[in-house]
Image: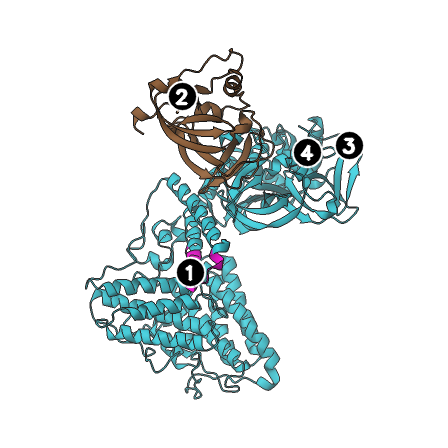
Amino acid sequence: MNPDSSPPLTGAAKPGRYLTFKLGPESYGLPVLGVREIIRLCPITPVPHMPPYIKGVINLRGKVIPILDLRAKFQLSTGGYGERACIIVVQVGAPPAAVALMGAIVDAVEEVVHLGEAELEPTPDFGGSPDTGYILGMATVHGGVKTLLDLNKVFLEEGLLTLIPAQTQNSKP
Amino acid sequence: MVSGNVATPEQNSPVLARATELLAQLGEELAFVEPGKDTGLLPINSLVMDFEELPRENAPEVFNAGLATVRAMLDHILDGVGKFSEDSIRLLTRWHESMSSVLAAWERGGQMPPAPPAWNPSAPGVVAVPAPTLPTLNSQLSTSAASGPSTINQQPSTTPSADEPAIQLNLTDDSELLREFHSESLELLQAIEQGVLRLEESPTDAGTINSIFRAFHTFKGSAGLLHLDALRDLAHDLESLLDGARRSELRITSDVINLILAGADTLKQFATEIGLQLGGVNPGEPIVVPTGLLRRRLKAALPGERSTLNPQLPTTPAPPLPRRADGPSSAAPESPLAAALPGGPSTLNPQLSTTSDATGFVKLDTRKLDSLVDLVGELVIAQSMVVQDPDVQRLPSRNLARCLRQLGRITSELQRTAMSLRMVPIGRMFQKMTRLVRDLAAQQQKQVQLVVDGEETELDRNIVEELSDPLVHMIRNAVDHGIERPSERLASGKPASGTVRLSASHQRGGIVIEARDDGKGLDRERILAKARERNLVKPNASLSEAEIFGLIFAPGFSTAEVVTDVSGRGVGMDVVRRNIEKLRGKVEIQSVPGQGTTFTILLPLTLAIIDGMLVGIGDDRYIIPTLSVRESFRPRPGMVTTVHERGEVVSVRGKLTPVLRLGDHLGTPGRAVDPTEGIIVVVESGDAARGLLVDQLLGKQEVVIKNLGETFRRQELLAGAAILGDGRVGLILDVDTLVKCQRTTNGQRVQ
């Protein structure tokens, strides 16, 4: 909760701690401040008539929280989850307004990294057509590129997100 | 919240503190034992073992004697049948009371009470008699009980005392009748005991008084038939006492309640003895249970004879009920929460209310209350998850099993108490209606009296708040449109003054609130005409009476213009139904022309928990609120037919109900392709019904309702979610949406 190490949940990427995780081959980061806990994959109760990226709900110690399938949300190929798959539980919404817990299934959690000004880069211009507002920025860690995500935009805004960074990066070289 | 149940002994004895704690636990265990079962036997035994392990060098002698006594009692049970009996439960309960008194005296550090005569280690199984110096217990009756034959094993007394009539069973001729009498009387006595418990809560409840009266009456009749004169006479006196209460000549006080209990206990001793003889124990011996003193006290208590009450007769009779704490000295924590935070004076236990330190009110934030109730709900589920966990079940530890049972009891008791905290009597709202009726009647020059009934009925305070508007509308409707002017009433042979009767009661697993007027009733033809005019029904539709009455709840249907032409505010009754349905309740109307109209509101007891029917579709499970379920059945071939390719209908008793294949609708195809392989659950919302085809019924259970939150705010199919027994989330279906949703065609969802 130290402001120095707590990047804002929304807006441009700020230095601070990020939790990085894998989604398919790509690596992403979420501001640690918004992450409440990481739990093992558990049985998910599907909710009918919801978009496919909403996997359903789980019981988190008596609370019913929705679970997002981030791969589906980003229109990545969906398939089975591996051994290392887990659920990142985040707190969305800005206190003191209504906050809620939500979960996201990711393929693997990597680490918590401290990102300084040097490692941060603004969101590159992907040509302007797709909305990249959900991206806080990019960061280079240990030689790999991480896409830093805007928690509230990813979790609260409805509809699918186009994962331009991955495609662009794959086609760049 | 709990004012220290564990005593802080003045003599600073850790042994005493521990003993008090153990006795409290013992009391909890005792409260849940049942005759004929061994539940709780081992926990009690191990608690007593814990007692025995206390360093007792400095303990009072009477304490050690008490332990020896209870050890003997338990050994007797353990070596014998291995189950509790009515007698052994009573003995243990009395022992517990006596021991409480001993510990209380020890704590005070004053004179120790003498050991009750029953605490003689050489006489196992003898009724534990409290010391006469102890105020909470009735020495007289217990002593007589001790001298009587009502013991587990003790040789029944064979010498009837001079003034106590003995009964002699004719086992050869009457054995069948006696057997019937025995089982019948145990049932009656149980009913009486339950009735008395209710009576303590609401001493004026005519229904309860009547039921106890009838039970004693039946008992008297059966005893008379078998020439069991002593029983018949005692039952007769008790019946007279209740009759006095029934005719409001006698007020039910705690003394009267104690008398009734003492009477029931005495009758039970007879019954138990009869049971023993039927079982071959000392057959043919005369049975003596002293009734003389009790009968004299009963007679003295009868209305009109109060002046003859002999002050020397003991006035605090009867051992208190086994499940009750008997005062501040008791170690049994009888829902301290309830005592500290009563929902209202009527929930106060009369015995507690007489003690100065047990009463008192705490104002508290209702949000805290709600969150407490919520958490307790979770605790109950978490507890059942632990108990049902296969890994836990495989563990062979008896100690674990004991602890889990104890945990289960405490959680369910905690849940009951927590729920009761939020309950408030509906009476205050009824009182508001009195004022409303008077004002309305004066405005319209009508004579109307409001009769209220069941004001003490308790329901969730959240519901009470939401109920105010619908009730006002209903009462207003009854006075405005139901009750006629005095002249009209007299002309149709009714008293000039009309009556609106507002009542509340617990029924059908929920609360039923009824507003009944004796006015002119609903005018079917005019309702129908108005509904056609407003295009609420098709011109040629044939509607049942219930459907016609239901029309007045339709939005935009103003009863004021239609039914009576009295120019009024035209209160929309749709508000009533909408509010009630928001509370997960429903409204029914009955009306007889010329005789009046009755609105019946059915409500769940609480908003936090619903009774749900768990249904399975494919691999998924859903919860349907039981209150909305009319029936469920497995359809026979031919019951489900397809109509004009528009959808399937099921024919139930000549009535066609559209069928919704729930699996297809929810997008999780069910296994039952042929309806006869599945179950049809007929649900209702308003006047509409629909048969939901599911794969199977998985059971009924109470669930704590959880909000689904923002993500699912547009999800109309679901009313919420709940954590099921296995820890997974179950979704609660919104019956309204399901009933009203578009018909599916060929299994395809219509958006």
Instruction: Please tell me whether the stretch drawn in magenta is mainly helix, strand or loop.
Output: helix
* Lower position in the chain sequence, tag 4 or tag 1: 1
The residues tagged by marks 2 and 1 sit, at their Cα atoms, a distance apart of 54 Å
The residues tagged by marks 2 and 3 sit, at their Cα atoms, a distance apart of 75 Å
Given residues A80 and B542, the one toward you in this image is A80
Residue range (magenta): B392-410
Measured from the top left, where is residue B506 in percent x and y? 53, 51
Q: Are marks 3 and 4 in contact (CB under 8 Å)?
A: no
Is the residue marked by circle 2 packed among few (<14), some (14-19), or many (20+) residues within 10 Å?
some
The chain drawn in brown is A
Q: Can I make out residue B731 in this image?
A: yes
State the residue lying farthest toward the top: A127
Left or right of A102 on screen, residue B550 = right
What mark, if any, has residue A140 been given in the picture?
2
Circle 4 sits on which residue? Answer: B527
The chain drawn in cyan is B
Circle 1 sits on which residue? Answer: B400
**Amino acid on which disc 4 is placed:** Ile
Is the residue marked by circle 1 packed among few (<14), some (14-19), or many (20+) residues within 10 Å?
few
SS at badge 4: helix
Front position among marks 3 and 1:
1
State the residue lying farthest toward the front: A173
- Answer whether residue B396 is magenta in the image: yes
The residues tagged by marks 2 and 4 sit, at their Cα atoms, a distance apart of 75 Å
